[in-house]
Each structure stands twice: as C-alpha cells, then as structure tokens.
C-alpha cells in the first residue's frame, strides 16, 4: 500500500496568521516598488513580465528596456500570436532561454484560437497555457485578477525557510511540497495582490541570500531565524557540477558579408551564431584570436574564442549574410556582443 503523506501545516498559530498577512501588506503598501507590471491589470502584460523575470533580473528586464519594447511591439495576444519567428526572437535577443519567448507566443496563439482573443479567467484554463506552471498561474490570478492564489518562487522559498525554520532541502520534492502548502495557507484572501507582492519583494530586498536585513524586517516578530544565523537557511540540494566547455568560432567577413550558421537544436532553434570549428581547425594552421569571453549557460561554463578567418569556407548549414542584414538577425546575447564589438572595431576582413 502506498504510504500516506502527512498533511503539511503552516508552523504558526492560526490566530497569528492574519497578523502576519497584515504586517506584510502594510509594509508593501508603504515600501513596495513601482514596476510597470504592477500598474496594470492586463493578464497578458502580467504574463509577459512574469515569464521575462523567470530567469532574468528586474534590472535587465526594465533597465535595458526589454519589457517596454515587447509591450510596444506586441501590445496584446493577437499581435504576439501573429509575429514572425525572426521578429519574436529578435525582441528576446539577449534574454536567453528562448523557449520562454516561443512558449509566450504559443500561449498567445491558444488564447486567440481557443478563447476568442480574451485572456481566460479560470485557474484551469490559465494553467493549461503553454509554458505556464503553477507559479505563473498563481501570479496571473493574483496580480491581474486580484484572486487569492498561492505563489512560490526562489525569494519566497528563502523567506519561508527562515520565517518558519525549515531545515530540509528547500528545492527537493519534499521542500517544494511544504513551501506550496504553506503558501496556500498564507495567501491573503483580502489583499492577494499586495500579499504575494510583499513576499516576493521581502525576499528581493530585505531577506536577501546574503546579509538579510533582519533589523528592518517587517515580519521579524514572526521569524524563528532572525539574526546572523538566518543565512544558513535555506539548505539547498547540491547543484549539478559545472562543466567547462571551450567553443571555437570563426569571424569571417568578406565583401560586405559575414559567415553565419543557423542554430538547429531545440533550445536555440532559429537563432544565428558564428560558425564553430574544432580546436584542430583553428590551431593548425593557427588563426589569430580576436576575442575570448566567458559565459555561463545552465551548468556549462563556456569559454568562447573567436578567430579571424576571412578565408573561411561555408560548411553545411552556414551561409554568407550581408552585414546590414546580420545586424537585425537574432543571436544569443554573448554572440551578439562579440559580433557587434568586432564590427564596431573595424574587423571587416
Ligand atoms: S527577520 Fe531576517 S531572516 Fe527573518 S524573514 Fe526577516 S529578514 Fe528574513
């Protein structure tokens, strides 16, 4: 017989839960930051912001203008659903994890096709949209529709683990089950928008991974970890080992054209990059190295070496592209930075 799971309950006396919610909401109303996605009740706009913020910092999404440009170019689901792939990828260029952009477009297409262009309001229909997981569905429900819905992200996991003293692995299955159960109990029936925003922002600004500011914390009186020991929580499952990879790319510019290859793998399909070669091909005979940069993609640490190769020949899947056209093609961020840097430096072959 399968073992029955014990019910997970919030480790806080029931009569103190309203006071904890009230402290969070009061702090957020006074201190909460003003982001464009907090000024709207448009579920599509909320979905865009949440998907962009999944693996990208607020400073990038806002400071580098991604969110504003996206909403200007694709102001509604119809505009996004109809966008050609090159335009979609170009608008996402530099944010990485391109599956997010494709899923956003698929979700927009479902809304157009199956809901007549009106964003669905039921939790089930929102959760059924491509790329929408439990967190994102809760975010749309609470931020756009003002409905009580639990959300758990990395910031909330940290706040909960410290507030309630969770010493298990926070990112394992047991930890996530616990965090979601707590979030369900703590969700604010009267102020769902502010309550969820408060938890996220508390983790971003006060209960930070290093040196949490417990002195300034609005929920300190409820917290079992306040003080220097707080940093020890949450305990995370060991990460995958980092794998070092070196990529050798050619910078081949000839007669106003640049040699490029189109990505075919599922993760970056449709993006353009510099052609890659084996180490032997760039060392025998040796090509002059133009740049060497490092970047991290998931658990890979990539050293990206670019060589001057005006005499290169195109291989299968590669083509010579006019420089003007290359400037508007979508490329992964690290490739775009190197190509733009070299072109600006006059490395025109
Ligand atoms: S008191 Fe400190 S550890 Fe506790 S929730 Fe606040 S900032 Fe985090």
Image: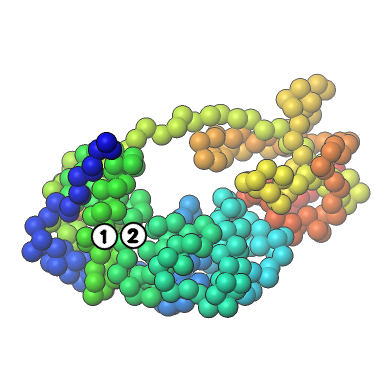
Give the residue displayed 82% in from the left and 54% down from the top: 323
Query: Which corner quadrant holds the C terminus?
Result: top right
Q: Could you classify mark 1 by the number of other residues whose Cα lies within 10 Å: few (under 14), some (14-19), or many (20 or more)? A: some
Which is more toward the observer, 41 or 27?
41
Q: Does the beta carbon at disc 2 come under 8 Å from ligand 1?
A: no
Give the residue displayed 33% in from the left and 73% down from the top: 147
For disc 2, the marked residue is 151
The percent position of residue 20, horizontal first and vertical second, equals 16, 63
The percent position of residue 300, horizontal first and vertical second, equals 54, 35
The percent position of residue 43, horizontal first and vertical second, equals 46, 73
Residue 228 position (above or below residue 142): above
Q: Is residue 174 left or right of residue 20?
A: right
Q: Is residue 98 left or right of residue 19?
A: right
**SS for callout 1:** helix
The colouring scheme, among rainbow, by chain, secondary structure or one colour, is rainbow
Give the residue displayed 14% in from the left and 63% down from the top: 17
For disc 1, the marked residue is 184
Q: Is residue 312 left or right of residue 146?
A: right
Query: Which corner quadrant holds the N terminus?
Result: top left
Q: Could you classify mark 2 by the number of other residues whose Cα lies within 10 Å: few (under 14), some (14-19), or many (20 or more)? A: many
Looking at marks 2 and 1 on the same chain, the residue that comes earlier in the sequence is marked by 2
Q: Mark 2 and mark 1: span between their CA atoms?
A: 8 Å
The residue at the far right in this view is 255
């Amino acid at each position: 017989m399968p073992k029955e799971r014990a019910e997970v309950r919030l480790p806080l006396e029931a009569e103190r839960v309203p006071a904890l919610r009230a402290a969070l909401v009061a702090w957020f109303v006074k201190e909460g930051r003003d982001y464009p996605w907090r000024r709207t009740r448009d579920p599509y706009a909320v979905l865009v912001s949440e998907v962009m913020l999944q693996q990208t910092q607020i400073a990038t999404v806002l400071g580098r203008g991604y969110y504003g440009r996206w909403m200007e170019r694709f102001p509604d689901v119809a505009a996004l659903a109809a966008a050609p792939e090159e335009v979609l990828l170009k608008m996402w260029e530099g944010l990485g994890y391109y599956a997010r952009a494709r899923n956003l477009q698929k979700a927009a297409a479902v809304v157009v096709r199956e809901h007549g262009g009106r964003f669905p309001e039921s939790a089930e229909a929102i959760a059924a949209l491509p790329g929408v997981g439990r967190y994102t569905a809760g975010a749309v429900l609470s931020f756009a529709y003002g409905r009580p819905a639990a959300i758990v992200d990395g910031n909330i996991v940290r706040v909960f683990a410290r507030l309630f003293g969770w010493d298990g692995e926070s990112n394992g299955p047991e930890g996530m089950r616990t965090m979601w159960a707590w979030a369900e109990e703590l969700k604010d029936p009267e102020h769902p928008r502010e309550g969820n925003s408060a938890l996220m922002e508390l983790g971003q600004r006060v209960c930070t991974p290093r040196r949490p500011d417990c002195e300034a914390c609005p929920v300190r009186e409820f917290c079992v970890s306040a003080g220097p020991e707080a940093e020890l929580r949450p305990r995370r499952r060991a990460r995958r080992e980092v794998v070092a990879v070196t990529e050798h790319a050619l910078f081949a510019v000839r007669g106003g054209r640049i040699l490029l290859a189109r990505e075919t793998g599922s993760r970056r399909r449709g993006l353009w990059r510099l052609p890659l070669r084996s180490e032997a091909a760039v060392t025998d005979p040796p090509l002059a190295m133009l740049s060497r940069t490092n970047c991290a993609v998931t658990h890979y640490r990539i050293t990206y070496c670019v060589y001057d190769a005006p005499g290169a020949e195109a291989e299968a899947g590669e083509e010579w592209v006019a420089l003007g056209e290359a400037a508007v093609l979508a490329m992964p961020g690290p490739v775009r930075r190197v190509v733009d840097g070299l072109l600006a430096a006059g490395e025109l072959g």
